[in-house]
Structures are given as structure tokens and as C-alpha cells.
Amino acid sequence: MSLLLTVTGRDRPGVTAALFDVLAEHGAEVDDVEQVVVHDRLLLGVAVAGTAGTGLRRALATRAAELEVDVELTPLDDDESPDGGVRHHVTVLGAPLGPAAFAGVARRLAACGANIERVLRLSSYPLAAYDLLVSGGRTADLRAALAAEAVQQSVDIAVEPATLWRRARRLVVMDVDSTLVQGEVIEMLAARAGCGSQVADVTRRAMEGELDFEASLRARVALLEGLPVAAVDDVRAAVRLAPGARTLVRTLKRLGYAVGIVSGGFTSVTADLVADLGLDHALANELEVVDGRLTGRVVGRVVDRARKAEALREFAAAEGLTMAQTVAIGDGANDLDMLAAAGLGIAFNAKPVVREAADAALSVPYLDAVLFLLGVPREEVEAADAADD
């Protein structure tokens, strides 16, 4: 017969050590341990085998009284031991993130045959984020059920299998326009060429998957014919990073990750991003220039959805990483192949067709929320930043 010890009370240094001393004195064998402290309140669970004698019970009761904690002893059947079955990380994000959202997530998990084993807070501001380690359930079923709950609760929920790759070095590759940076560069160029509304409409339809990307890009670039290079320089200077983009890249680099960009946009912008952020890989379209003006043509092969997926594979091979170690982030239909090829595909403020296809979706404006999907708590990010100041 085994025992489950459940210890609750005010936490302070030495409580855990004192209780384990009692277990050692009575020859108990530890099968499992879980401990969490919430606002100085301790919850410690210990499954022990080898003894269920009254001597151990009396000794634990005496030591608990001295420590001013409560100890509950529950007999366990042999078939109640942890089985190490399939586990997933379920990340829930919202601003706000209320009890109704937690209740809805818990119900959906239970309906899929999954059980919450642990909850860890990743962030409390500017949005709340929690990582739930759950056992049981199929990945596809969990994603479908929780995607429906996310819509109902107006929160973001991501599901990722709990595998070795979550703790391994990774390659993170991002789209640029409306992902790493705010807005669409080609629309900014078109505004200076006097065809802004026309280009914006074509861009929208291409990103929603209504138009072939290569054909639409060539048509849009043709409208820029004659635009002076000085206007391109003005647009490059006006480009702004998405909120949290610098924090995301800086943290990923600290973790030893490789970071890259693939863009249906233009090298005239991405070259500066590579230098500014210290990116490891980049691929984008090149605008043809003759006598200081755009010709309305693109040089070489267009970076379309197929080329983006190829680039992801090329970058991973260059880094010596498997595709399971890759993360792709994008917002438009041009990113679909890349998101599908990645170990983890993340839709960031994406079009509906992209949100439905991605492994995870974020609807918050902060790009560094991606870190929560990778299990990185905000307090660790802030501590690392403070150490560098």
C-alpha cells in the first residue's frame, strides 16, 4: 500500500526538508513529488511506497504540528501511480483572463479525456498567460475543442505536445510585413506612387488567399514603376517594429536560438532589420532599380508561399536542426506552407484562413507573447534585461 501526503500551510524555508527527514527515518520510498507555492501558501504532494505504518503517521503528525502545517494522508492503490502518458502544454492568454475562461478550458479538457496536472503563471501584464501541463487526450482533438473555447471566451489558446523539442535549441522564422513590422511596406511605397488604395485592395485579397501571390505581387510592383529610390529610403526609415518584436528577438538570441525572416516584401527593408536585430537568416524579394528609379519589376524568383517553406527548411539545415525544432510565425496566406512545415506554426493577428490552419494563434498586439508559447515566463525575460542594464 502506498500513501499520498498532501501538505498545506504557510511556506517558509525548511518545511520540505523537515518532512522529508521524517520519510527517510521511516524508510519510505518516494514515487512522486509535486510542490507549488502561491502567495506564500505551500501545497506539497508526495506519493510514497514501502510503508503505511502508524509510526510514520504519528511522526508526520508531530512534525506537521511543529511546522504549523497540515498533512493529509490518503491511501493509494497500485493502479493510481503516474503512468507517464501523453502530455501537452496548453497555453492560455488573455487581457483579461477571468474565471470563466479557466472554467471553459477545464471543461473542454475533461471532455477530451485530458487532466490538468500543473498550472504555471507565465505573465500577469500587459496580458495574463498561463501554461497548463495536461495528460491524456489527442493533439487534434484538444486543438479543435480549445479553438472553439478560445472564440467563445475571446482569449488565445495554444496546444503543443510536451516533447523534448520544447527544451531544445530552436530556429524561429518570421514573416515581416504585419508580423515583425507594423503594416505592409508595399502599401507604403504605393502611397508615395499615388496608387495606395489600388495596391491595398490587391494586398488584402492576396493575404486572404483569394489571389495568386506571385501574380499579385508582380502586378503591384508594376504600379511602382518610376518611383525614385529616395522614396524607398523614406519608407525604410518609416518602418516600425511590432510591439514586443525587439524583446522577442533579444530573448531568443539569449536562449541560443537561431532567428530568421522570410518576406514577400523587399530586401530594401529587410537588410536593415537583419543588421538592427542581429538576425541569422533572411530572404526577401529584390526590387529592380535602373538610373535611380524602380522599373516595376522584381529581380529573380518571387518569394511566395512555397519559397517561404523552402527557406525554412534551408535555414534549419544550415543550423543543423530538425524541422521539429522550427517555429514559424506569420499572418497571411503566403505563410501557410511555412506554418505547416514548421514544428510549431503560429498565426499572429492573422487572416481567418491562417488562424484555422496554424498550430497556435495569437490575437494580441505584442509579438513577444510568442515567448509564452515557448514556455518562457515574463519575469525571467525581465530579469535577464535587468542584468544587462
Image (tube, helix red, strand yellow):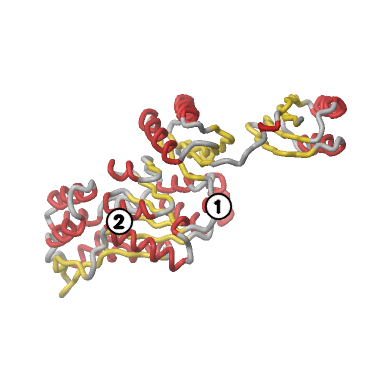
Label placed on residue 192: none
Place of residue 170 in the rendered image (x, y in percent of width and height, measured from the top left): 48, 57
Which amino acid, mark 1? Leu
The N terminus - image quarter: top right
In the displayed structure, 381 sits above or below 51; it is: below
Q: Residue furthest front?
A: 79
Q: CA distance from mark 1 to mark 2?
A: 37 Å
Q: Earlier in the sequence, mark 1 or mark 2?
A: 1
Q: List the residue tagged with mark 1.
A: 164
Q: List the residue tagged with mark 2.
A: 239
Q: Is residue 208 left or right of residue 128?
A: left
Place of residue 213 in the rendered image (x, y in percent of width and height, measured from the top left): 21, 56
- Residue drawn at point x = 66 percent, y = 32 percent: 79
Pick the residue in front: 203 or 359.
359
Which amino acid, mark 2? Val
Pick the residue in front: 340 or 7.
340
Q: Is residue 197 left or right of residue 99?
A: left
For the question of whether residue 372 can be seen, the reply is: yes
Pick the residue in front: 148 or 175.
148
Q: Which mark lies nearer to you, 1 or 2?
A: 1
- Residue drawn at point x = 45 percent, y = 52 percent: 248
In the displayed structure, 58 sits above or below 210; it is: above
Q: Is residue 15 left or right of residue 229?
A: right
- Residue drawn at point x = 39 percent, y = 29 percent: 153
Tell me whether the residue at label 1 lies in contact with that at label 2, contact meaning CB atoms closer than 8 angstroms.
Answer: no
For the question of whether residue 98 can be seen, the reply is: no
Crowding at dot 2, Cα within 10 Å, few <14 / some 14-19 / many 20+, comes out as some
Place of residue 283 in the rendered image (x, y in percent of width and height, measured from the top left): 33, 65
Give SS at disc 1. Answer: helix
Q: How many marks?
A: 2
